[in-house]
C-alpha cells in the first residue's frame, strides 16, 4: 500500500479531534451485551448507570458502557449489586488503581468463602439424599419380596393328590 493510500485510510478511520465522543442508545447496548433494555434501566435505577438525556432518549457514553460491562462481569461472578456498585464507583474515582484492586480482592475472597461454604452444604445435603434414597430402595425391595404370593401348586399335582 502506498504512503498516500495509508494516509487517506488513517484520516478516514481517525475521528476528527473536535468530534464528540461516541455515544450509544439503550437498544445498541442491549444488543451488544445480549440483555434487555429493561435490565439496563434497572441498573440505572440502582445507580450503576447515569446516562445523559437528549429529550426523552437516553444517551450512554463510553463510561456508561464500561460501567455496564463491569456490572455484568460482577453479576457473572455472583456479586451483589451493592458490591458491584462499590467496585464500579472505585473504577470511576480516577485515582491510583491499587485501592480498587485491593477492594476487589477483598470482595472476591469473601465471595469465595461463601461459595465454598455453599459447596460444603450442598455436599452434606447430597449425602443425606443418597442415604434416604438407599433406605427407600431397601424398603421397596423388602416389600416387593413380602408382597409376592406363595407359588400355587400346579393343577396336575392337585388332581393327582385327590
Image (cartoon, grey):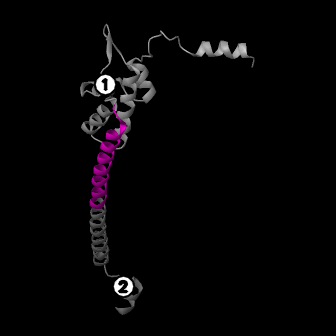
User: Taking 16 as reference, is 147 left or right?
Assistant: left
Crowd tier of the residue under label 1, counting other residues whose Cα lies within 10 Å: few below 14, some 14–19, many 20 or above:
many
Q: Which mark is residue 49?
A: 1
Q: Which mark is residue 85?
A: none
Residue 6, image x, y percentages: 69, 17
Residue 151, image x, y percentages: 35, 82
| Residue closest to the eye, 86 or 44 | 86
Residue lying at 30% horizontally and 66% vertically, measured from the top left = 127
Q: Quadrant of the N terminus?
A: top right
Q: Which residue is mark 2?
A: 153
Vertical placement of residue 51 versus 56, above or below: below
Residue 19, image x, y percentages: 47, 10
Residue 26, image x, y percentages: 38, 19
Vertical placement of residue 128 versus 145, above or below: above
Crowd tier of the residue under label 2, counting other residues whose Cα lies within 10 Å: few below 14, some 14–19, many 20 or above:
few
Residue 112 falls within the magenta-colored stretch: yes
Residue 118 falls within the magenta-colored stretch: yes
Residue lying at 65% horizontally and 15% vertically, measured from the top left = 9
| Residue closest to the eye, 145 or 25 | 25
Vertical placement of residue 142 versus 19, above or below: below
Element at badge 1? loop
User: Taking 158 as reference, is 136 left or right?
Assistant: left
In which image quadrant can residue 67 be found? top left
In the image, the segment drawn in magenta is 95-121
Residue that protrudes farthest toward the front in the picture: 96
Element at badge 2? loop
Vertical placement of residue 84 versus 150, above or below: above
Amino acid at each position: 500500500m502506498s504512503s498516500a493510500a495509508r494516509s487517506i485510510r488513517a484520516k478516514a478511520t481517525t475521528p476528527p479531534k473536535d468530534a464528540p465522543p461516541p455515544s450509544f442508545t439503550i437498544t445498541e447496548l442491549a444488543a451488544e451485551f445480549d440483555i434487555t433494555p429493561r435490565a439496563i434501566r434497572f441498573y440505572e435505577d440502582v445507580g450503576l448507570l447515569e446516562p445523559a438525556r437528549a429529550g426523552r432518549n437516553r444517551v450512554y457514553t463510553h463510561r456508561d458502557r464500561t460501567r455496564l460491562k463491569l456490572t455484568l462481569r460482577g453479576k457473572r461472578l455472583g456479586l451483589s449489586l451493592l458490591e458491584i456498585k462499590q467496585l464500579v464507583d472505585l473504577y470511576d474515582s480516577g485515582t491510583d488503581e491499587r485501592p480498587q484492586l485491593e477492594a476487589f480482592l477483598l470482595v472476591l475472597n469473601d465471595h469465595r468463602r461463601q461459595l465454598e461454604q455453599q459447596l460444603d452444604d450442598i455436599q452434606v445435603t447430597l449425602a443425606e439424599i443418597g442415604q434416604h434414597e438407599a433406605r427407600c430402595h431397601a424398603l421397596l425391595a423388602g416389600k416387593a419380596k413380602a408382597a409376592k404370593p406363595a407359588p400355587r401348586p400346579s393343577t396336575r399335582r392337585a388332581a393327582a393328590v385327590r
